[in-house]
Amino acid sequence: MAKTVALLLGVHAHQPVGNFESVLDDAHARCYGPFLRVLHQYPDFHFAIHISGWLLDYMLENYPEDMHLLKNMVQRGQAELFGAGFTEPVLAAIPVRDRIGQITRLSEHLKQHLGQQPQGAWLTERVWESTVVPALADSAIQYVTVDDYHFMCTGKDTADLDGYFSTEEDGRRIDLFPISEALRYRLPFSPAEEVVSYLESLADDSKQAAAIYFDDIEKFGIWPETYEWVYERGWLRSFIEGVLKSDIIKPMRYSDYHAMAKTRGVVYLPTASYIEMNEWTLPVPAAHHYADLVAQEKHANRYEQNKPYVRGGIWRNFFMRYPESNWMHKRMLDVSARYHALPDNKKTADMLKALYECQANDAYWHGLFGGLYLPHLRRAIFNALLTLEVLLDAVTQRPLKVVLDIDLDGHDEAFLQNGVLQAVARLDGTASICELDTYKLHHNFGDTLTRQAEHYHRKVHAEPGHHHGGEGIANPHERMVSKHEITQADLAVDAYRKTMFNDFLVAATGQTKIIQYGTPAPGKTTLDFVGEVNGGQVHKKISLNVNSLLVSYKLAKIPEGVFKVEINLAMPSCDGPAGRFRIGENIPCGFGQVLNLTGLKSIALEDEVLGGTVHLHSSVPCTFSSQPHFSVSQSEAGFEKIMQAVTIQLQWPVALLAGELEVKLEIV
């Protein structure tokens, strides 16, 4: 019997909810469109494809011709459609009822528009927790793909991972296909003939051996260097034609292989994702220790044998690492509970759409990929959250003031809302505002990011390490470039959360103390704090008045110094041309520039992307300073600086504050 190997090739197409249309159009021009058009010319090359629901809707509307090609490939039995959560959530991180709803919605969408009910599902970021099994099974999914690394962590040998396995949870079964890391790192970076030869080397006599690949389609045209390599230099055609000419390689749909082959047996996988993700979840210094240990094992030529036991963290660590991610997640859980508590006749399609959009995974995490550092992706989460909150409030009224520890950090937060604005104050001693929402504009002005140490920061000024020198092109995991000039000052770590209305007293010596406040006094619609500093007191009151946030201060028995208030405002335009300061008819600069003024009582922040303006008023003339708040992150394109907020500081000599000081943010 001749040796053969089934090639199960799958690609995953996804764009984050809220991504720029220009990015989607470029992705289609350089990847989605060319890939589908090439594959359509080879009916015998069977493959699988997953397209997340938000991207699918965009492509159906804007590129119907290419979607018609895909539908045709489905109809002729060439292409298999894979399901998942509609907006690409990490299933393990959302409530069970939303897991089922998200999966079912995409499956129905694929059946309606492309003519096939999926049997398999793409697991977002290959994040595996056994708790997702019942929801997958209850949504009519028969199998999913996860990394071969997941199996190696159970003690499985890679040589045995050429078929599918079965697992169960709470009596429901799901079959698991192990994605080959060796193939992930070869396609499409190695020359086509080398990949074909490698695939042929995987054949055996059983006729049930499978070479299993499922990875981002963006590797085929969007990643650096890949468009020229895959299409202009003909890698994809050469690969397909090489596979079809082979008597050994049999390209198949997952569904056909699943129907033909038997399970390799039962397996129970640990909670894990792909190797790189497990590293990205670790905070400094643990991430440094992990990377050093991996380097040590590689140097000793032990890594391939020991990597299942040199384990990083789990995906949910991102909620632990980043307070901003945790905050979004817990806010999402809260609105999900409110939605599901409604009677069915009160629920609407718009509510469900908004709920699913605020569960999209991208803005919740960060590594080489992931969008937590990208303000426009976090903004999309809050846009959906606030849209849903408005719809829910129209059906079930909320109290004007609620106090609870929503983010499970050991400190309560106080929510004030009046139907127009919502302010959330931290009761952790800072009495600062971590969320300021305008329901009209569906925007959170507190949506910024506090700079913290990242493992890759120590690589920014390092000498380039590995350089790809053989045939093919570099894998982005091996690249180390910089899109911007990065200085050590850019890598500074913030000493406190970059929230709004952090208060300080600056002594004549220059020593700065952050003012600590006690528990607020009882009040129906206001928050009244008292802080102690240098033997004196600061009385702070937070309230809402229609479309204005009012924060008033009264200082008592503080003999000298400068009172300083820091406000970090998340403005959608960031340092782009659509955002600017205005004082009367004068436009001094944009948000990305440094601005220093004296004797200021009023200034406006205009933002065309926001579609509104923030008017800042001080009842006592102040010394005003503003500068952009940047973070340094990494992406597949290299290290980059991203503006997270406008950091505004207002200062007054204590001697001038005999009466009450009021700072007002009016949003129109």
Image (spheres, helix red, strand yellow):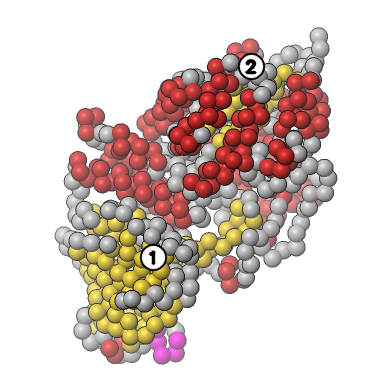
In percent of width and height, residue 257 lies at 63, 16
Q: Which residue is mark 2?
A: 257
Against 443, residue 656 (above or below) is below
As drawn, the label of residue 468 is: none
**Does 235 sit left or right of 514 as displayed?**
right
Image-quadrant location for residue 335: top left
Image-quadrant location for residue 149: top right
Residue closer to the observer: 344 or 110: 110
In percent of width and height, residue 98 lies at 38, 33
Task: Give the mark toward the camera: 1 or 2.
Answer: 1
Question: For the residue labelled by badge 2, is the local secondary structure a helix, a strand or a loop?
Answer: helix
What residue appears at the point 35 percent right and 41 percent down from the top-left corner?
A: 354
As drawn, the label of residue 569 is: 1
Report the amino acid beneath label 2.
Tyr
Image-quadrant location for residue 600: bottom left
Report the amino acid beneath label 1.
Leu
What residue appears at the point 48 percent right and 63 percent down from the top-left corner?
A: 576
In percent of width and height, residue 38 lies at 66, 29
Q: Which residues are magenta?
A: 503-510
